[in-house]
Image (cartoon, grey):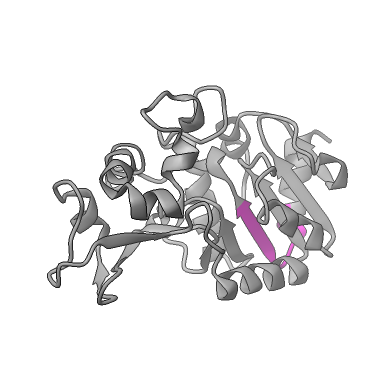
Amino acid sequence: MNNIDTLNKIIKESKQIVFFSGAGISTLSGIKDFRSKDGLYNIKYKYNPETILSSSFFYNNTLEFYKFYKDKLNSLNIKPNIVHEFFYKLEKVGKLKSIITQNIDGLHTKAGNKNVLELHGTVYKNHCIKCGKFHSAEEVFNSKDIPLCSCGGIIKPDVVLYGEMLDDIVFEQAINDIMSCDTLIVAGSSLTVYPAAGMIDMFRGKNLIIINRDITPKDNLATLVIHDDLKNVFNKLDIE
């Protein structure tokens, strides 16, 4: 039995699956990841992208932050891909407990999934730092220079920047889901970013599946490891 047949069998026999989604899922839709050789961290800007995407930079260099943010993190016109669609179907047939994602592009929600735990927030939620009013992603990305609220306050994306903590409620729910599922499928994540990567250690179920183009530090813990292009893998999966 090859890896794809084994994965199909595991999915068929599983009752509660949690999907842990990394940046590699989004690259199939045309969004650059952060750490690969052609990712955002290896593209030269006036400032290092990791510096730009920090809380201190947002408050001290807001205009420069938004130049980068609007140019590189705008997912308004990006469409879900075969991986997003697969897990939407898995949710529809009642096998998917939740999706835990490190991505901020909102593509799992666009695909139709209801129970999506966004560890690092989403570009689709934004708030005024002065009055707290909600603002849409369209308002932010279509604004000129720094997006401002009607009260005059600066609008901030509800994404977790470097130097900020993960949302406690989202993080705790993600841990609970990982600890209570029978199968955990991890795809498109290098599993090197903490605390998210450490969540995998909390899994107590039967099958840990890791699907990634490159080796990850957690491969030795997995029931099944598939090193392949995600499109190749998910083209061959069947949930019937």
Q: Which quadrant holds the N terminus?
A: top right
**Residue drawn where x is 80% and y is 57% of the image:** 201
Give x and y (percent) for residue 239. 62, 52
Q: Which quadrant holds the C terminus?
A: bottom right
Residue 150 picture quarter: bottom left
Q: Front-most of 213 and 157?
A: 157
81 inside magenta stretch: no
Residue 3 at least partly seen: yes
**Residue drawn where x is 41% and y is 55% of the image:** 106
13 inside magenta stretch: yes
Q: Front-most of 182 and 24?
A: 24
The relative height of residue 150 versus residue 18 in the rendered view (above or below) is below
Magenta extent: 11-20
Position of 222 with respect to 44 (left or right) is right
Give x and y (percent) for residue 98. 59, 65
Position of 98 with respect to 130 (left or right) is right
The relative height of residue 173 versus residue 106 in the rendered view (above or below) is below
Q: How many marks?
A: 0
The relative height of residue 35 versus residue 131 in the rendered view (above or below) is above
Position of 142 with respect to 12 (left or right) is left
Give x and y (percent) for residue 238. 62, 46
Position of 215 with respect to 204 (left or right) is left
Residue 240 at least partly seen: no
